[in-house]
């Protein structure tokens, strides 16, 4: 588990980079149990927050509502850029 400085606020945090539940296990409390476990780890390590990454595509809308129900807030934008692997490799 990586412990980092929290850019959006003071203190340290644990970032959940990816969370996806198989269709067969959705709405059965599995994701809630996982997030609660990570929160317990964060508390034990003195972290002041959890951060969670989630894609913007439409298939994630339900997940976003779920995260907000658990108290997560939209806090920032995440940017990406592709790298040209052939440029300069002549």
Image (cartoon, rainbow, N blue to C red):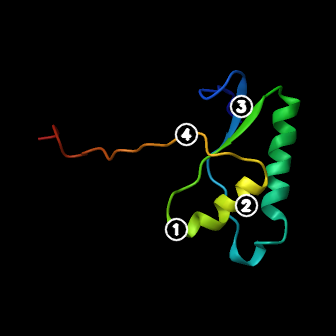
3 or 4: mark nearer the eye: 4
Q: Nearer the viewer, residue 90 or 18?
A: 18
Query: Where is mark 3, residue-wise?
Result: 13
Quadrant in which the C terminus is drawn: top left
**Where residue 26 sits: x, y (%)?**
75, 72
> Label 2 to label 1, Cα distance in Å?
14 Å
- On screen, residue 31 versus residue 81, left or right, reads right
**Is residue 84 placed above or below 14 in the rendered structure?**
below
- Most distant residue in the left direction: 90
Question: Which residue is drawn at the image coordinates 67% and 32% (left, top)?
Answer: 2
Marks 3/2: CA–CA distance: 20 Å
Q: Residue at x 87, y 40 (%)?
A: 40
Residue appearing at x 17%, y 42% in the figure: 87
Structural distance between the alpha carbons of marks 4 and 2: 18 Å
- Judging by the rendered image, the residue that carries numbered circle 1 is 58
Q: Which residue is mark 2?
A: 66
| Label 2 vs 1, first from the N-terminus | 1
Left or right of 44: which side holds 48? left
Element marked by disc 4? loop
Tell me how far mark 3 sits from mark 4, CA to CA: 15 Å
Residue at the bottom extreme? 24
Question: Horizontal and vertical percent for residue 23?
Answer: 69, 76
In the rendered structure, the answer to whether residue 69 lies left or right of residue 63 reads right
Mark 2 or mark 3, which is nearer the start of the sequence? 3
Which element type, helix, strand or loop, lies under badge 1?
helix
Labelled pair 3, 2 in contact (Cβ < 8 Å): no
Q: Secondary structure at mark 2?
A: helix
Q: Secondary structure at mark 3?
A: strand
Residue ID for mark 4: 76
């Amino acid at each position: 588990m990586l412990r980092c400085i929290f850019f959006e606020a003071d203190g340290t945090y644990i970032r959940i980079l990816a969370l996806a539940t198989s269709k067969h296990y959705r709405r059965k409390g599995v994701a809630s149990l996982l997030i609660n476990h990570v929160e317990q780890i964060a508390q034990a390590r003195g972290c002041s927050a959890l951060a969670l990454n989630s894609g913007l595509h439409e298939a994630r809308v339900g997940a976003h509502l779920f995260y907000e129900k658990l108290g997560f807030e939209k806090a920032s934008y995440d940017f990406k850029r592709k790298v040209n692997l052939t440029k300069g490799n002549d």
